[in-house]
Image (spheres, grey):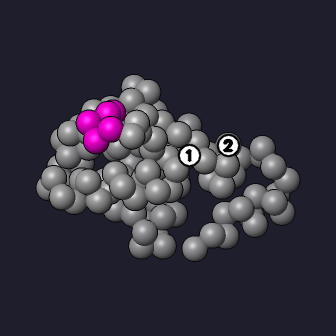
Amino acid sequence: MLSRLQGLVQLMRLKRKWRSETYYVLEAVFLKGSIARREVERLTGLSDKTAKILATQLVQAGLLATETTALGPYRAAYPIGLAPALFPGLYTAGKEIDMLNVD
């Protein structure tokens, strides 16, 4: 699973949508189940503002979930649209290609 997360981050880097540090956050959330919000800054070595932007991107992508409170931890989420990258072979090849052709 970690190699699939790394591949997804590399794909999104090529599309210039995510930073390479994104992987560290996804890895930690996958291995631990959840991480504190301040952990994003520590894991990535980014400034507070940039770490918040990165986390927001992951929430918008559906890979991180959080409670409605501003202080709740981030937890792992697996959006159906990214299923082909995270769980290859779950759908037929044609369907997987269609699902991954999002901008």
**Residue occupying image coordinates x 39% and y 40%:** 68
* Identity, as a three-letter code, of the amino acid under mark 1: Arg
Horizontal arrangement in the rendering, residue 24 relative to residue 3 (left or right): left
Q: Residue 84: image x %, image y %?
A: 69, 52
Residue nearest the observer in this picture, 100 or 67: 67
Discs 2/1, front = 2
**Residue occupying image coordinates x 36% and y 55%:** 56
Q: Residue 38: image x %, image y %?
A: 20, 39
* Identity, as a three-letter code, of the amino acid under mark 2: Phe
Q: Is residue 85 among the parts visible in the rendering?
A: no
Query: Quick one: label 2 or label 1, which is nearer the N terminus?
Result: 1
Residue at the top extreme?
32
Residue named by callout 2:
87
Mark 2 is surrounded, within 10 Å at the Cα level, by few (under 14), some (14 to 19) or many (20 or more) other residues, namely few
Label placed on residue 4 = 1
- Asked if marks 2 and 1 touch (Cβ < 8 Å), the reply is yes
Horizontal arrangement in the rendering, residue 58 relative to residue 93 (left or right): left
Is 55 magenta? The answer is no
Residue numbers of the magenta segment: 69-73
